[in-house]
Amino acid sequence: MKNYALWASASVLALGWGGTAMADGAASPTASGAGTSSTQQPAQAAPGTAKAEDDQKVEKVVVTAERRKTSAQKTPISVTVLTGDDLANKGVTIVDQLQFVAPGTTIDNFGQGIDFNIRGIGKGEHNSQTLTGVITFRDGVATFPGYFTEEPYYDIARVEILRGPQDIFGGQNATGGAVFVTTNSPDIGGGTHGYIAGQVGNYSDVGLQGAVNLPISDTVAARVAFNAESRDSFYNISGPWTGGDGALNLGSGRVSVLWEPSSQLSVLFKTDYSYLDMGAYPAGPVLAPNDLFDLSANAEMRALDRLVRSTLKVDYVFDSGITLRSISGYQFGITQYRADLDGTSAGNTTFRDSVDETIWSQEVNLVSPDEGPLTWLLGAYFQTDQYNFPPGQFSIGLPPGSPFSEYNLQGTNPTQAEAVFGQIGYEFLPGLQTQVGARYTDARTTNHVLIYQFSPVPLKTDQTDKFQNLSGKISLNWTVDEHNFLYAFYATGFKPGGLNVPVGAATPAPFDSEKVKEYEVGWKAGFFNGHLRTQLDAYYNEYDDFQVIVGFPNFPTFGFELNVPNTTKMYGGELQAEAVFGAFSLDAGMGVLHSELGDFFAVDPRNPVPSGAPFFIPFFAQCDVKLGATGINAFYVAQMAPYCHALGGKEQTYAPTFTFNLGMQYAFDIGGGDTLTPRLNYGHVSKQWATLFENAALGDKVESRDIFNVQLAWAHDDIIATLYGTNITDQHYVAAVNSGLDFAGAPRQFGIRVVKAF
């Protein structure tokens, strides 16, 4: 439903903290001086102690995304696992920054929405009808599909970034990958403990967060966590404009309660609330000569998200060792946005909306014991998700203020999905295992809307469509020895289609589902007696019916969504490494990707077909992708050049050919049990295209990003003080392009944060 906003409105870019991380999920400070991570010595080491070099190895980590705990090095999938301390060390506090610490990941954040892609697959179009192919789970619950993206990372236990289709393990369908964010849970029997952290920085940045574990009884414990930050705007904006300027005011809180009356039953309840006032998402016209942070505007600007999430996880282990699990979720959010669509004080095009979204979800699993040659998983999933567009709150003004010059939309967009899934694994020879899994999904979407198209007379629209799919995975896994693990699999993924709302006098047809076929091989290894751990993989994807928004020829200001009718091919690989040698530790990742779009034709809305020319072409005939370049459509293409563009062979949007990340640190023992640890983080994302038209002259090319972060941490007893700097070269880079506007990434920030554990 928000597909019009791609071409006619500036959806918003998240500026976030820009890497000014506090110690998310910090437990006690450690000898490393920067928190315990998967590349540092174990957390149980007393502060300031120096273990023997042979004992300082890469810490073993587990993943839980497959609904059971498995070693990351023995799980047949490409995955990046980050502990809460890893996030702090790498300067990750919001989702945007994951692209600088995980290979193959790109995130173009417009604030209200996000284009999140892994290996070039995820969400290439931004509207409420298009689901994302990269699903974010918060404490086991699939969260908002692309909106409310500025929810910060605080008091985090771990983040797991899984690459490739993830359909068979529950939750929503995921064609590109999944991100599992797990917050710290209460600790029964752990006493009262926690941390408090504060920071100050440039742009008048002030932040405070903390968490405390509260023992209630022998079977009940609670945990309370909070996060708050205030920061001035990055922008210099001339007017006249009203509202926010991009100044930040965030506040979030979480309460968790764990009840374990017996060794068989565990009940975990968590509820979050976030107030995310981003001030505004200022942006200027693409290719404008001015600096990205020097803008003008003459409209009201606002960017405010409020959301609540409650999750309930119940585990019961039968005497047989089988686990019955229930994961329930309720989520409600309200997003309000105001923007200057032309990005200058010379024009008068505006956009405003206030939209709320409600999600209910329920998942049930039966999980076999981990022991024995045969393991299995069965599950079912149900979710409802409804957008509500109140009267007068979704409006595009050209100029604003009159029903004859505004486009208005109101109504509801409810969706529903049901699925059953399962997997079975069998070790038929020592070290050799095969796994087979499948998922059946039934999804439906509905529009109940009134549309005022530059007229006081509304057009009522009621539409419904359904989508079904059977996806699956077959894998062969070989544990060669304790240091080497090989896998190969074939998997399919599915993302439902959606509805196009009316444009002009007609309603475009619904757009169909996306489907992915993936072939992947991988090798996970350990070297030097556990001091070096690596992951290497290669993949080949056949991507069918890619969903894309193109210009509507007779109303080129707007777009409608359709499917690329021919297969898009994508292939590449990733390499990850983590190493610990004495006081020195290093982590690195690299991804390469080649993408080649399937053949089809489309009209670029920025270079539209003139009204009535060629007048004899039927309403929907221009660049009809279903007809291809043969027959009558070949004649249309010849008549309409240069309006009809052949896009086959071009790169996928948001699919950079190269990503790279590197982090390294050295812990100096400065005596008295204190350590001083300098750390460098570097992230590179190569150039990418914001649209399939790949017209650099119109601003489609998003140049590469090279982000350097540094920090110097001093650890003393239970206190860590860290000097930090993010984007220290102050690269002014375009972080996203939308509706002809450039949205800037965060500039250089620096400051100090102090963490005290208790």
Image (cartoon, rainbow, N blue to C red):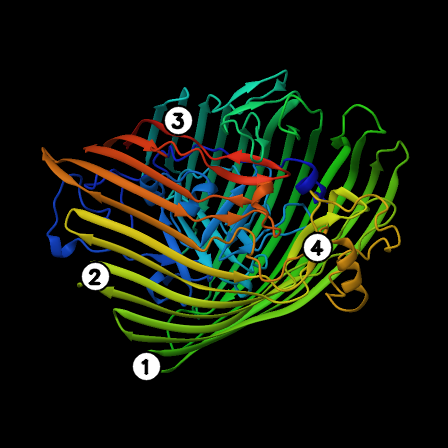
Q: Amino acid at mark 2?
A: Gly
Query: How many residues crowd around disc 1 within 10 Å: few (fewer than 14), some, or many (20 or more)?
Result: few
- In space, the residues marked 4 and 2 are separated at their CA atoms by 53 Å
Could you tell which of marks 4 and 2 lies nearer the N-terminus?
A: 2
Q: Are marks 4 and 2 in contact (CB under 8 Å)?
A: no
Q: Amino acid at mark 4?
A: Ala
Q: Are marks 3 and 4 in contact (CB under 8 Å)?
A: no
Which secondary structure lies at badge 4? strand
Query: Mark 1 = which residue?
Result: 430
Query: How many residues crowd around disc 3 within 10 Å: few (fewer than 14), some, or many (20 or more)?
Result: some
Q: Nearer the viewer, residue 719 or 88?
A: 88
Could you tell which of marks 3 and 1 lies nearer the N-terminus?
A: 3
- In which image quadrant can residue 19 be found? top left
The location of residue 665, given as percent across then percent down, is: 22, 43
Could you tell which of marks 1 and 2 lies nearer the N-terminus?
A: 1
Mark in the foreground, 3 or 4:
4
Q: Nearer the viewer, residue 7 or 309?
A: 7
Q: Nearer the viewer, residue 309 or 391?
A: 391
Could you tell which of marks 1 and 4 lies nearer the N-terminus?
A: 1
Could you tell which of marks 2 and 3 lies nearer the N-terminus?
A: 3
Mark in the foreground, 1 or 4:
4
The location of residue 94, given as percent across then percent down, is: 45, 39
Query: How many residues crowd around disc 4 within 10 Å: few (fewer than 14), some, or many (20 or more)?
Result: many
Q: Quadrant of the C terminus?
A: top left
Query: Mark 2 = which residue?
Result: 530
Query: Mark 3 = which residue?
Result: 208
Could you tell which of marks 3 and 4 lies nearer the N-terminus?
A: 3
The location of residue 699, given as percent across then percent down, is: 57, 41
Q: Residue at x 70, y 55 (%)?
A: 602
Q: Amino acid at mark 3?
A: Leu
- In space, the residues marked 3 and 1 are separated at their CA atoms by 52 Å
Mark in the foreground, 4 or 2:
4
